[in-house]
Image (cartoon, grey):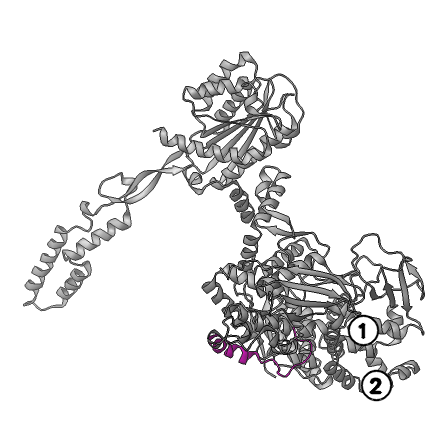
Amino acid sequence: MTDRLYEGADWDFPTLQRIHDACEEIAEKELGLNVYPNQIEVITAEQMLDAYSSVGMPLYYKHWSFGKQFAHQEASYRKGLMGLAYEIVINSSPCISYLMEENTATMQTLVIAHAAFGHNHFFKNNYLFKQWTDADGILDYLDFAKGYVAQCEERHGRAAVEQTLDAAHALMSHGVDRYPGKKSLDLRAEEKRARERRTHKEAAFNDLWRTVPTGPSKSASALSTERRRALLGLPQENLLYFLEKSAPRLKTWQRELIRIVRHISQYFYPQGQTKVMNEGTATYVHYRIMNRLHQNGQITDGNFLEFLQSHTNVVFQPNYDDRRFSGFNPYALGFAMMQDIEKIVTDPTDEDRAWFPDIAGKGDAMAVLRDIWANYRDESFISQFLSPRLMRHMRMFHLHDDPAVSEGIRVDAIHDERGYRRVRRALARQYDVGLIDANIEVVDVDLAGDRRLMLRHAVLNGALLNEPDAKRVLQHLADLWSYDVSLAEVDASGLVLKEHVAHPRVMAAAA
Amino acid sequence: MAMHIVDRRLNPSSKSLENRQRFLRRAKALVQGAVKKASQDRDIKDVLEGGEVSIPLDGMNEPRFHREGGVRDRVLPGNVKFVEGDYLQRPQSKSGRSNDAGEGDGEDAFRFVLSRDEFVDIFLDDLELPDLSKRKLAEVENEGLRRAGYTTSGSPANISVSRTVRLAMARRVALQRPRPETIAQLEAELEHCGDEARPELLAEIERLKSKMRRIPFIDPIDIRFRRFETMPKPVAQAVMFCLMDVSGSMSEHMKDLAKRFYMLLYVFLTRRYRKVEIVFIRHTDRAEEVDEQTFFHGPASGGTLVSSALQAMHEIVQSRYRPADWNIYAAQASDGDNSYADGDLSGRLLKDMILPVTQFFAYLEVGEAGSHPFEMSESSLWTLYQRLRAEGAPLSMRKVNDRSEIFPVFHDLFQRRQAKEKVAP
């Protein structure tokens, strides 16, 4: 049992296998994790940069924006501004983790424990991922998407495809279903259906847009507002879905491209909502595994010190007035909360018992944590499990910046008895998806008139859209819609604060 | 549970290359502008080094809906001095870092690194030098030797042994020359055989031996010599002479114009030749060879004698750059002043010494920005060179007053040269 997994910094493939098996033993027996099968891929630094520019996915369709990303990252990497991540892990089954060949054996152990077990378990068990992503199908679907885009470029020209993708990318953040619908995503079937659908759609046409008059009975007013909105599925917050289904003049292939962007956007949707939890889980898991390996004598004291140094860097949280500060470090916050919960469950104080009666002193930390990992996302996780102790430890405070108040920014609450609940609520809201993205939905279409598409932005706390960018996005939207598009920014009382209008340009595809 | 390890290190690594090219293509105009700007601040030789350029994000940005302003709530770590109800001064800058919108926010320029090749391609592309003119640029050709098959006559030093032996063998096989082993075998048999077979064997051996003598191992007709033929070989190195008048009448603006021109010529030549050297000769009434820094920035004063520079160039060519081995290019920049008495000498030097050995000689007359060339009277140097040209000397000359004219003039110069070559036999 006390055999060393490796000596020094060097490793080879049998070493990786031994490391994986040792980690697996601890992960399953001691932590009770339930993971997808692992696939570990060894890559070079350059390949890591490559992977960065396509959001970590091993395959992706071609688009200039990924090239831009790559150029930018390469520049910062070469200047030494940015270190490369130690690992990238993909939510797929089998779960793919990339290891960089430059890493030492200790780093590889850390990465395997972190990604191949921590993230992997989270992907497989968290309800958001279960609900929204199809880990079995994603790689095949991306392969299909890549091929489909390439095929479209051949058939319809690169410019037209690029224009459609640009527009779809601009709307990507508003191309997700925020609430679970009837169907769960099945990407394999999606891919299979794609070809059938294309032929079917080419034959079918949308009755709504029929221009040939069929008889005297149907007048414009006959189509009541209610009926019209029902037919179009309004209001609709998934702009990409709405365009795909209802934009009158899109070609079938354009609808399919929009659909691809929408599916990929949906696939990444849970990751944005679980950053703190996901990284917290993975960091907690690697910390437990590395400690156990060290206790078992499977890694040396020197290896363990090397691990601790990396670990400390990863969970470093600069203070708000530090030059390095750029918000909460999800690794730091997540890890601190996991450890805190462990303490509450195993060794609670009176304060813990008062705040967390359900879990305090229950004894089995892993059972509680596994349950939390499966059933929460960042917002609910923080609003329920951020403890006063941790708020004190991280010295959190809540700032309220109301431009109407001339005195400046008000310190609304600090880490004291009066402030705990408010600080916690405010921090949880910071991770609320409903509040992170602007709430924009399609409200109506002027079917009788100029077919103008009407959108509404429900303004929250007086925060309006950044105007230049909003104009550009609307322009893309209008290009896809092919008629005018208007966006009204409306506050809670129904008052219109601002209105934007965009007119379609001639799309390359329409020519 | 089953675990797979896949070694991806040997996979093609430049998966992003295509995306990168798409990006560059899309940002072409912006990148060209950036390259032009980046090349302004560089020394001539560094122009080719590639490197970081930054382009405005505008046009390359990927817009998203994001919000700004309004009432903001934020939780931060690290409070040491605030209590509830305190007020903080708002930071002065309008766009604080508190906005967690996507990339591009607050970042007005996009920086990335171009490789050397990408940089030069874009740089030359910007010149709009047609490929045709690049290819037809005359180059001095040198005689070189090249293997050209085999011949039946030649010097013994060039005998091709392998070819000769091969032919000899073919001939021996074709004529069925007996093998020495066969004879040796027969002779061995002879020792042991009975008397009745002996005469037959002896006759056979004798027959074979005489056939062997008649068919020699190597015949003169087998002998082949390696053949060489002479062929023109391009000279792969070039030297570029930069001559500049640095007398007091040359302003910084004029020097800048000259520098730009030299820069273009240098880039152009490096694309063409493997090795390019630069010689800087500055002159007032005396000429001296200097380094680049002194050339463009070193102070100097005095009169103007163009012949001194031409003489210096001639001497350097004589001592260091044999015209047979080097392609010699020269570009002279001046405001056109020259002392009147120097005209004849300069003309003679140029015509008899310089032009015969140079590949290309360009004269660039630089003027102050905004002045109209046609309003000025012709300068003394311009008049002199024009006369030489009228007499048939292969000189290229242009006037430049403004930065923006450099590219077109450069382009124009090379086109004209091509046209002239067609006319001249």
Residue A11: in sight, yes or no?
A: no
Residue A183's quadrant in the figure? bottom right
Tell me what residue is drawn at x 82 percent, y 77 percent: A383
Pick the front one: B81 or A314: B81
Q: Earlier in the sequence, mark 2 or mark 1?
A: 2
Question: Tag 1: residue type?
Answer: Ala
Say the numbered circle drawn on residue A343. none
Q: Nearer the viewer, mark 2 or mark 1?
A: 1
Residues marked 2 and 1, same chain: yes
| Residue B214 drawn in magenta | no
In the image, residue A71 lies at what x, y percent?
Answer: 61, 56
Q: Residue furthest top?
A: B341
Question: Tag 2: residue type?
Answer: Ile
In the image, residue B137 lies at what x, y percent?
Answer: 43, 36
- Badge 1 crowding class, 10 Å Cα cut-off, few under 14, some 14 to 19, many 20 or more, is some
In the image, residue A256 lies at what x, y percent?
Answer: 53, 71
CB atoms of marks 2 and 1 within 8 Å: no
- Tell me the quarter of the image containing the N terminus of chain A: bottom right
In the depicted structure, whether residue B333 falls above or below residue B234: above
Tell me what residue is drawn at x 63 percent, y 21 percent: B247
* Disc 1 chain ID: A
Residue A476's quadrant in the figure? bottom right
Q: Which residue is mark 2?
A: A359
**Span shown in magenta:** A175-199
In the depicted structure, whether residue A510 falls above or below residue B316: below
Would you say B336 lies left or right of B237 here? right
Say the numbered circle drawn on residue A428. 1
Residue A497's quadrant in the figure? bottom right
Pick the front one: A151 or B159: A151
Pick the front one: B366 or A209: A209
